[in-house]
């Protein structure tokens, strides 16, 4: 890892709320000599704009990395600790050591670098905005692939969030290994499986 004492690293995650799949974090060190116009909180951008910016971030950033924590780690640690673990993995595998790490939210992972949390940072700091875009597009791509393998859950549409259609699909088709079994809707289904599930899927 190269040293870059004054470089700012932005960190954000995507996927804390869904019932399935990993939580994904990204760490980005932008290049001041290659600015990227239009960076913003990923939630305020269209899917097409996020994908366009993600390409530019990967091309122009001095360094970037994406990491995740698995559903098993989420169940074992809880979602906050798993999110911080994914963030730490992303930062620690950067090829450049940052001078300071700026993290969206109000918690920082344990890091060997100076770090501070910024509430709403994905709308305030360009490096955090870039990280939010990379994390969101990477997780969306993962969910589309999961949807291709398991189309019965509709994951490409809702990305794993607890929509009425998603909850109905879980009731009908059951809980698979990529679900977060500690999350309340999934936990309730595991504790009280619907009596008609076996008949419907037989």
Image: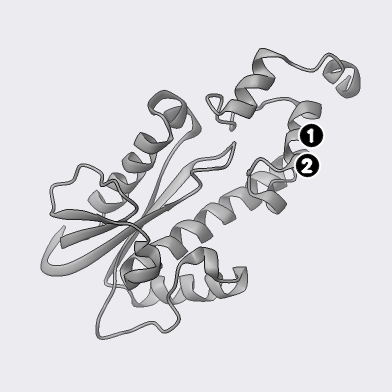
The x, y position of residue 26, in whole percent, is: 37, 56
The x, y position of residue 130, in whole percent, is: 39, 68
Q: Is residue 69 left or right of residue 97?
A: right
Residue tagged 1? 168
Q: Residue 62 carries which label?
A: none
Q: Is mark 2 on a helix, strand or loop?
A: helix
**How many numbered circles does the render carry?**
2
Query: Would you identify the image quadrant in which residue 128 lies?
Result: bottom left
Residue tagged 2? 165
Q: In this view, does 97 lie to the left or right of 137?
A: left
Q: Which residue is drawn at 75% across and 45% down?
A: 154
Q: Looking at the figure, which quarter contains the C terminus?
A: top right
Would you say residue 60 is visible in this rendering?
yes
Query: Would you identify the image quadrant in which residue 103 lies?
Result: bottom left
Q: Which residue is drawn at 65% across and 27% down?
A: 176
Q: Is mark 1 on a helix, strand or loop?
A: helix
Marks 2 and 1, how far apart at CA: 5 Å
Q: Looking at the figure, which quarter contains the N terminus?
A: bottom left
In the image, residue 109 above or below residue 120: above
2 and 1 marks in contact (CB < 8 Å): yes
Q: Residue at x 64, y 44 (%)?
A: 146
The x, y position of residue 167, in whole percent, is: 73, 35
* Crowd band around label 1 with a 10 angstrom C-alpha radius: few (<14), some (14–19), many (20+): few
In the image, residue 2 above or below residue 167: below
Would you say residue 97 is visible in this rendering?
no
């Amino acid at each position: 890892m190269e040293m870059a004492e004054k470089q700012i690293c932005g960190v954000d995650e995507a996927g804390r709320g869904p019932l399935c799949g990993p939580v994904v974090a990204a760490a980005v060190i932008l290049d001041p000599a290659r600015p990227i116009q239009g960076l913003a909180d990923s939630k305020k951008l269209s899917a097409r704009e996020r994908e366009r910016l993600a390409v530019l971030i990967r091309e122009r950033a001095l360094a970037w990395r994406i990491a995740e924590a698995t559903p098993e780690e989420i169940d074992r640690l809880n979602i906050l600790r798993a999110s911080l673990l994914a963030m730490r993995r992303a930062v620690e595998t950067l090829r450049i050591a940052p001078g300071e790490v700026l993290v969206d939210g109000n918690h920082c992972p344990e890091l060997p670098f100076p770090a501070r949390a910024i509430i709403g940072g994905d709308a305030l700091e360009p490096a955090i905005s870039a990280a939010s875009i990379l994390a969101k597009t990477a997780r969306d791509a993962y969910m589309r692939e999961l949807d291709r393998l398991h189309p019965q859950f509709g994951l490409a549409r809702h990305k794993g969030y607890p929509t009425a259609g998603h909850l109905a699909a879980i009731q009908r088709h059951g809980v698979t290994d990529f679900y977060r079994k500690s999350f309340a809707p999934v936990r309730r289904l595991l504790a009280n499986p619907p009596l008609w599930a076996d008949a419907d899927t037989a």
